[in-house]
Image (cartoon, rainbow, N blue to C red):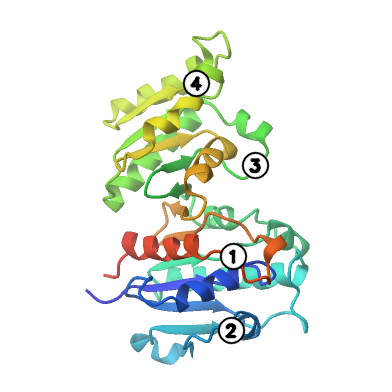
Amino acid sequence: MSLPTIGITLGDPGGIGPEVILKAISQKGTLPEARIILFGSKLVLETEKRSLGLNPDIIPFDETDSADLPPLSLYDMPYPARVLDKGAPSAANGEASFRFFEEAVKKARDGLIHALVTGPISKHSWNLAGITSAGHTEYLGRIFPAAIMSFWSESLKVALFTHHIPLKKALAQIKKSNLLNFFLLLQQVFKKAKMHTHRFLVAGLNPHAGESGLLGTEEIQEIAPAIAEARKTGMSIHGPFPPDVLFRQVLGQPDTMAIALFHDQGLIAFKIVAFDDGVNVTLGLPFIRTSPDHGTAFDIAGKGTASPKSMIEAIRLAARLQPAD
């Protein structure tokens, strides 16, 4: 089997994305065997290299010779300003990070890269640049309606029914038909990818999963009926379970994934146990997309203190889930 080709976007130039990427690719023996293409700006990379005192051997990407790629290359894209903004959201950084990502997605759709790892972006920066997508997953969801946001670590896996929308809107989505469609889509994605995980546990919405209707009726009227319908198709799905105990049931079970109904329900639990090495995985795409589970961390950008652990795990998982043909 030939080596997989992994694209990595630098993320927001004002955040810690370029730092953790440089640290990750500079650590010998930590990354899988793969060809890596960085999507970003030479200016951004050179600035970060000087700041960190790192100088990995990065070859300019040559699109005319893509059949014989070097181990590490840069698909150089111009930075849209004369001065690099660091440590805060900005329109220039929003435009740059979006263009890096947009181009990498095109190359993934064209088959140049087998998996895509995205550096953290700032939704505020995207907004300042006039980018209407709320984030990576939302952009991908417009192209690939089957896109599902999930989070993976050695100890815990979580899929999110809703993610980057206000809580009030997320609660309005909790209907039997919506949930059933999501469950069946998740089952289809895992079957197609032949992934090891095969059992799903669904969180309830209310305290104690509604306490038989005393603390809320969504479990009885919407969630449990959707689970029952999904089970009729042969899906190994169970619940709804009280949210305060669900994640203990999934913890340390590699063949089991929790389904959270809204963003913070799943992410609070996940980041408590896997903040340093957790990975955001977008399922349901024709290629694998992963990213660190942290954000731009503007408060520590430029200080050289950011940990590359989550970025390293994102690259490793991308190679493991989507090897080259």
- Name the residue carrying label 2: 53
Q: Secondary structure at mark 2?
A: loop
Residue beneath disc 1: 306
The reply to whether callout 4 and callout 3 are in contact (CB within 8 Å) is no
User: Looking at the picture, how far across and down is residue 220, in whole percent?
Assistant: 48, 14
Q: Measured along the vertical axis of the image, is residue 93 above or below residue 197?
A: below
Please state which of residues 200 and 137 is positioned toward the viewer in this rendering.
Answer: 200
Badge 1 or badge 3: first in the primary sequence: 3
Crowding near pointer 2: few (<14 within 10 Å), some, many (20+)?
Answer: few
Mark sitting earlier along the chain (2/3): 2
| Most foreground residue, 182 or 298 | 298
Mark 2 or 3: in front is 2
Amino acid identity at mark 3: Ile
Disc 4 marks a residue whose amino acid type is Glu
Residue 311 in percent (x, y) is at: 49, 64
Q: Quadrant of the N terminus?
A: bottom left
Q: Amino acid at mark 2?
A: Gly
Check disc 4: other Cα within 10 Å, few if <14, some if 14-19, many if 20+.
some
Where is residue 78, by image quadrant? Answer: bottom right
Q: Looking at the image, tell me whether mark 4 or mark 3 is earlier in sequence order.
A: 3
Label 1 amino acid? Answer: Ala
Give the class, few, some or many, for how many residues have Cα within 10 Å of label 3's Cα (few <14, many ≥20): few
The residue that mark 4 highlights is: 222
- Between circles 1 and 3, the one closer to the viewer is 1
Q: CA distance from mark 2 to mark 3?
A: 40 Å
Q: Which residue corresponds to mark 3?
A: 165
Nearer the observer, disc 1 or disc 4? 1
